[in-house]
Image (cartoon, grey):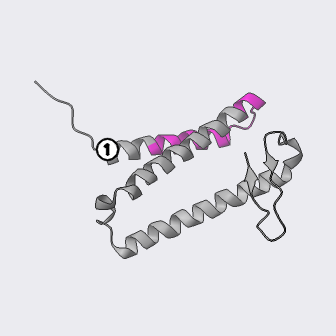
Amino acid sequence: MCFPPTITVSEQWITQSEQILKTIEQNIKKAEKDRLEAITAILYVINAIDRSLHGWRRWVQNLRFMTQFSSEELHQMEQGLSHVARVFIENDLDVTKRYAEKIPQSRFRIRQRQPSTDSSSIVA
């Protein structure tokens, strides 16, 4: 009996991630998209980001696994993730400011605070 070759979790993750990147590139290159296709592409990207974040969270929360990395390796991971977070949040902020009038206001209520406390809190 011949068994298929064993594939590791890391190899599977890499293969799936490469396929996700190809799909994202294909979506970017598609010149003519209707609104539904654009929404579908946005949702695909958000799900890809969520998948990656979930994977990172599983790694980082496993301290026994994380102790295998040197301080330099951890620093490099931190720097890379910080860069990605900064770019993502800057894009989020830009889109929110640009389209603020299209965001439904009824879902959020800004809680008024006393002058001596922080007034930046938003309650969902």
Q: Is residue 22 left or right of residue 65?
A: right
Q: Is residue 39 left or right of residue 5?
A: right
Q: Note whether 60 is above or below 2 in the view shown.
A: below
Name the residue at the bottom extreme.
Answer: 72
Give the amino acid at mark 1: Val
Helix, strand or loop under label 1: helix
Q: Quadrant of residue 88?
A: bottom right
Answer yes or no: is residue 49 visible: yes
Report the predominant secondary structure element of the magenta stretch.
helix
Q: Position of residue 38 (x, y in %)?
A: 72, 35
Residue ID for mark 1: 9
Name the residue at the right extreme.
Answer: 101
Residue at 45%, 53% in the rendered image: 57
Judge by depth and name the residue closer to the eye, 52 or 67. Answer: 67
Q: Note whether 53 is above or below 23 in the view shown.
A: below
Residue at 80%, 53% in the rendered image: 111
Residue at 74%, 33% in the rendered image: 33
Q: Which residues are magenta?
A: 17-38
Where, quadrant-wise, is the N terminus in this rendering?
top left
Answer yes or no: is residue 34 visible: no
Q: Characterize the local packing of mark 1: few (<14), some (14-19) or many (20 or more) Cα atoms within 10 angstroms.
A: few
Q: How many marks?
A: 1
Q: Quadrant of residue 108?
A: top right
Q: Position of residue 121 (x, y in %)?
A: 74, 58
Q: Position of residue 61 (x, y in %)?
A: 39, 56
Q: Is residue 4 left or right of residue 92?
A: left
Judge by depth and name the residue closer to the eye, 3 or 63. Answer: 63
Where, quadrant-wise, is the C terminus in this rendering?
top right
Query: Is 26 a magenta residue?
Result: yes
Q: Quadrant of residue 104?
A: top right
